[in-house]
Image: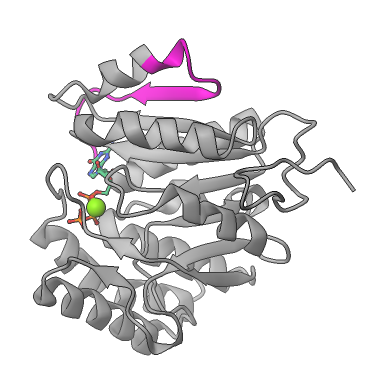
Amino acid sequence: MPELKSVTPEKPCITPFLDASSASSVLVIIPTFNEADNIWRLVSELSSLYPSIADVLVIDDNSPDGTRDIVLSMQATTRGLHIISREKKLGLGTAYLTGFRYALEKGYRYIVEMDADFSHDPAMLQSFFDAMNGADLVIGSRYMNNTVNVVNWPLGRLILSKMASIYTRLITGLPVADPTSGFKCFRAEVLRGLDLERINSQGYSFQIEMNFRVWKKGFTIREVPIVFVDRSVGKSKMSKKNIREAIWIVWWLKIKSMLGFL
Ligand SMILES: Nc1nc2c(ncn2[C@@H]2O[C@H](COP(=O)(O)OP(=O)(O)OP(=O)(O)O)[C@@H](O)[C@H]2O)c(=O)[nH]1
Ligand SMILES: [Mg+2]
């Protein structure tokens, strides 16, 4: 059994796959566009919760608010902090794909997706790591066991998200309670097993498409409960276009899969 690494005094043990004697095996990918008010605190919390276990990769799309400069200034004092700066806003899906390629190239074993706006609590990552034993993809779910763990969302937003989950399950059969969640952890083999070049959806559709492809390849998906808190700082970048895309993507995935083109 490898040496175990403590995270907080209350949680002395972390799951055995995270071997503290080797280099970081986890890469947390955080896409950012105008997250200057969040990124410093998020990176600080991650590096103090998971020292020497998880590296962080920020994918910034030339945020006018200076997000990139904050990350660059933290690099001198923060171990394992990386940044890829893209020239303009190119969308969430391509940001993650860029991060996935980086992770595979560098040999990380576990790859986390996480928003910068504190809707995803860094402390909850511990339960993802625990659940990775025996799973290929762990999804942080707001809607497990018929509960709704969402704080501060307007009712309309909540209904939309919940309906999207039901709709996705009904059309595609994907056995996931929260298919649009953007808080998740992949085993590297899963990303290697997918044809990432063929994925070009964005936003919610990107999450649905990734889950669907992972499921169709026969990988094991597990959900862990999370509490999703609406951002208190900064602006949402989700658009009506993202919602429209998610409506048709489920049919596109289903048809492609039925024809054997997935
Ligand atoms: N690099 C990059 N990051 C993006 C882009 N669009 C959104 N993001 C980031 O992706 C994460 C999720 O975006 P949000 O705007 O919070 O979207 P959301 O969480 O689905 O929606 P809200 O609940 O309204 O906040 C945040 O960290 C954003 O900064 C983009 O085009 N490029
Ligand atoms: Mg958000």
Say whether residue 134 is left or right of residue 191.
Answer: right
Residue 251 vertical placement versus 99 (above, below): below
- Is 80 placed above or below 182 here? above
**Is residue 142 magenta-colored?**
no
Q: Residue at x 47, y 37 (%)?
A: 46
Q: Which residues are magenta?
A: 74-90
In the displayed structure image, the side of residue 213 where residue 17 appears, left or right = right
Residue nearest the observer in this picture, 109 or 125:
125
Q: Looking at the image, which residue is at 29% across and 25% down?
A: 86
Would you identify the image quadrant in which residue 74 lies? top left
Residue 262 visible here: no
Left or right: residue 19 compared with residue 57: right
Q: Is residue 33 left or right of residue 50?
A: left
Foreground residue, 142 or 162?
142
Q: Nearer the viewer, residue 99 or 80?
A: 80
Q: Name which residue lies at 72% across and 53% down.
A: 15
Nearer-the-camera pick, 23 or 220: 23
Where is residue 80 shown, x and y percent of the image? 55, 24
